[in-house]
Image: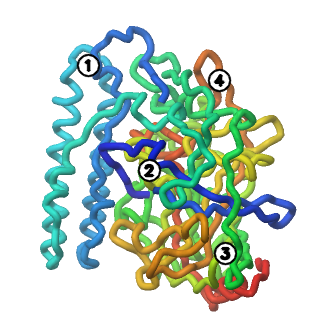
Amino acid sequence: MGRNTRKRRTPLATKAIAASAALALGGGGLIWANFYASAHESSNQTWGGNETKAATASVATISCPDVGQKLTNVPYRARQGVATELANLDKQITEAYSRLASTRDAQAKDPSFVQNSIVGPLKEKRAATINRIRIDIQRVGGSFDNALQQLAACTTQTANQTTAGGQQQNGGQQQNGGQQQNGGQQQNGGQQQNGGQQGNIGGQAGNGPVAADFVDITKVAPNVQGKPRQLRNGSTGTFTTRCGVNANKNFNTDNVIVAPGVTNGAHHLHDYVGNQKVNAFSSNNTFLQGGTSCQNRSDVSSYYWPVVRIQDGTQDFDQNKDGGGKEGNVGKILTPAQAEIKYVGSPASKVVAMPQFLRIITGDAKTTTNGLANANAHWSCTGFENKVQLTQQYPICPQGSKVVRSFAFQSCWDGQNIDSANHRTHVAFADPGSGVCPNGFKAIPQLTMRLVYNINPPTIQNGQVKNAYAVDGFPEQLHKAATDHDDFISVTKNGLANKIANCINRGQNCA
């Protein structure tokens, strides 16, 4: 998904993530958590060894202001060109981070190295790219806010400035329009280490995760809240679609929503279920011809998410490829044991059918540098889903319990657009307390997804994590749990969209 980077992070005490969970027994006794969540945004860490080295030696990553999220009114005729340039900004950050990670010795010897050799040149490249975005927009008669040119400059972050587990705040309270605050009881905050290697911050590729990114879920206080009250006009049905777990290994590192026409636009690997012909060059016509992994052949929607890997020293097929090992995504790729996709209703109203080709992105792949404004990650363990949901840490599950990733997409649509320039403003979250959509928005079936993984619990020894697991991400995001995200393109045939809405509105449980 596209970057969402900001220079200054919002403190969790004032801008946390809040979610309320609705619990219902699904097929086979599975517990589902439907989060009416809006996503609106550590421990001290050293590089090991001599802590008196130049300050620049402790730079963990690069933080660049978000350009794409500021572009909310891009004329349609300019969107392809702008998307290409935004992908160039992504590539520039990736390349700068690679240089940052490979020049630790030079940084230790020269305190000005990072600024002069990495951040300074990056600013010049970004300035030129932002100027090309201006030209693309103005060429077709659009207006460009010249203040965006001030977003060229990037900063650096030390390890304790990233949104690692040690910054978790007290949870269980609704704030700021329904954002989930995770935890209060997160552990290992003071133990974050770099794996003992000078010049990296742990992890098999040297870019995380670290010990503070994990927590023993049995030691976390319950933080899941109740669902909104069901109103008389609410829609109580569900519609389950079974699309498999990507056992056929349909992968790529593209993102056709954010970076159409750009190979490796995601810079990390995605699992795909549903539509089988999705890559950077796919079009709406391609989707209709793509076939599907879903049992319901009328569901040719695309459901895709970043893979999870076990960092146990294994080298997978993409060890030497872009988006894989070349960009810090390493380890054994895990196929989910279960991938459950369910559409649910609104507690406040009936729903309207999803429009054909609607795009929705939930979560934010860039929270490490952007903060938690758009984070919507939910990590838990089987047996704990109705008690604990984590955003900023990966759970260490007890023996016999499995790791669970849950997603609850935006459930309100502006009634007009299937996408928006920043891929966010055409959809919204319902109010977490009432389930009511914002003014001007209509309730649509809420897509929920639940991915279950068989993972041997990582262990933490002497402040270091062994056999860590982590979600794929952009290399400079350091594999934090909060960067988890999910992507969806609604494509249906034979009136399926209306059938889903009608089932939900009638209060039935359909599949």
**Helix, strand or loop at disc 2?**
loop
Give the mark nearer the N terminus: 2 vs 1: 2
Badge 1: residue crowd in 10 Å (few <14, some 14–19, many ≥20): some
Label 4 or label 1, whichever lies nearer to me, is: 4
Q: CA distance from mark 4 to mark 1?
A: 31 Å
Q: In the rendered structure, find residue 106 and report the number of the disc placed on it.
A: 1
- Whether residue 320 is situated above or below residue 277 in the rendered picture: above
Give, as a three-letter code, the residue at label 1.
Ala
- Residue corresponding to mark 4: 460
Place of residue 72 in the rendered image (x, y in percent of width and height, measured from the top left): 30, 69
Give the mark nearer the N terminus: 2 vs 3: 2
Place of residue 495 in the rendered image (x, y in percent of width and height, measured from the top left): 63, 91
At horizontal 56% and vertical 74% (from top left) the residue drawn is 436
Give, as a three-letter code, the residue at label 4.
Ile
Could you say which is closer to the camera, residue 63 or residue 128? Answer: 63
Q: Could you tell me if residue 245 is visible in this image?
A: no
Give the mark nearer the N terminus: 4 vs 1: 1
At horizontal 13% and vertical 61% (from top left) the residue drawn is 146
Place of residue 501 in the rendered image (x, y in percent of width and height, measured from the top left): 65, 85
Q: CA distance from mark 2 to mark 4?
A: 28 Å
- Residue corresponding to mark 3: 347
Badge 3: residue crowd in 10 Å (few <14, some 14–19, many ≥20): many
Q: CA distance from mark 1 to mark 3?
A: 58 Å
Label 4 or label 3, whichever lies nearer to me, is: 3
